[in-house]
Image (cartoon, rainbow, N blue to C red):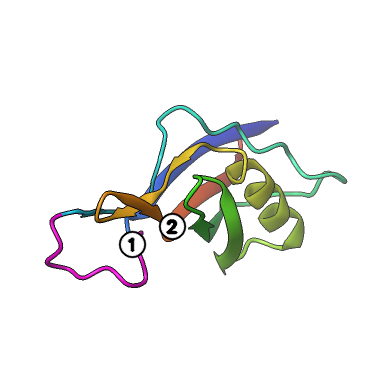
Amino acid sequence: MRHFLSLACLVSLAQPAHAQATSPASSPACVVAGSCPTPQWPKPRAYLDEPYPVRVALLIAPDGRVAGARVEQSAGRLWDDATIRALSRCRFRPARLGGKPVPGIIKMQHLWTLD
């Protein structure tokens, strides 16, 4: 049985690539609370003897969609792919610079575990 333990913003490093730290009109990308579906257990079922975290960095486009993903801590390809599929269906608010939406990076984690 699967159990969804954590889905969290680890670091709000969603500063636009060209944003300056002192710019008051900039804001990082962020996930819309409650918008992420629970990742589906990969098939074929794989055995878990301990919790497996998957950490990903998501590139959030100016329209709030996931434009790319990079695994930063892997639990194996099946787990990584299932995590990215689910997190890509979350809703995001894009980063802003000068009030305009710009690309940004957000880091998230999912912990795969059995009940």
From the image, give the main secondary structure of the stretch colored magenta: loop
Q: Position of residue 13 (x, y in %)?
A: 33, 62
Instruction: Identify the mark at residue 82; answer none if there is no mark.
Output: none
Q: Position of residue 12 (x, y in %)?
A: 32, 55
Residue at the location (70% across, 31% down)? 1
Between discs 1 and 2, the one toward the N terminus: 1
Residue at the location (67% across, 57% down)? 80
Q: Position of residue 71 (x, y in %)?
A: 59, 65
Q: What kind of residue is marked 1?
A: Leu
Labels 1 and 2 touching (C-beta < 8 A): yes
- Eyeballing the image, is 103 above or below 39? below
Q: Which residue is nearer to you in this view: 96 or 41?
A: 96
Q: Secondary structure at mark 1?
A: loop
- Eyeballing the image, is 59 above or below 29? below
Q: What kind of residue is marked 2?
A: Lys
Instruction: Identify the mark at residue 13; answer none if there is no mark.
Output: 1
Residue at the location (44% across, 60% down)? 103
Q: Position of residue 48 (x, y in %)?
A: 69, 49
Q: Which residue is nearer to you in this view: 48 or 83?
A: 83
Horizontal side of 110 relative to 101 (left or right) equals right
Residue found at the very far right of the displayed protein: 44
Q: Quadrant of residue 69?
A: bottom right
Q: Is residue 71 magenta?
A: no
- Rendered-image quadrant of the C terminus: top right
Q: Quadrant of residue 31?
A: top left
Residue 73 shows up from this direction:
no
Write the start and end of the magenta stretch as one range: 13-24
Residue 39 shows up from this direction:
yes
Horizontal side of 77 relative to 56 (left or right) equals right
Tell me the residue that label 2 is attached to: 107
Q: Is residue 23 magenta?
A: yes
Dot 2 surroundings within 10 Å: few (below 14), some, or many (20 or more)? many
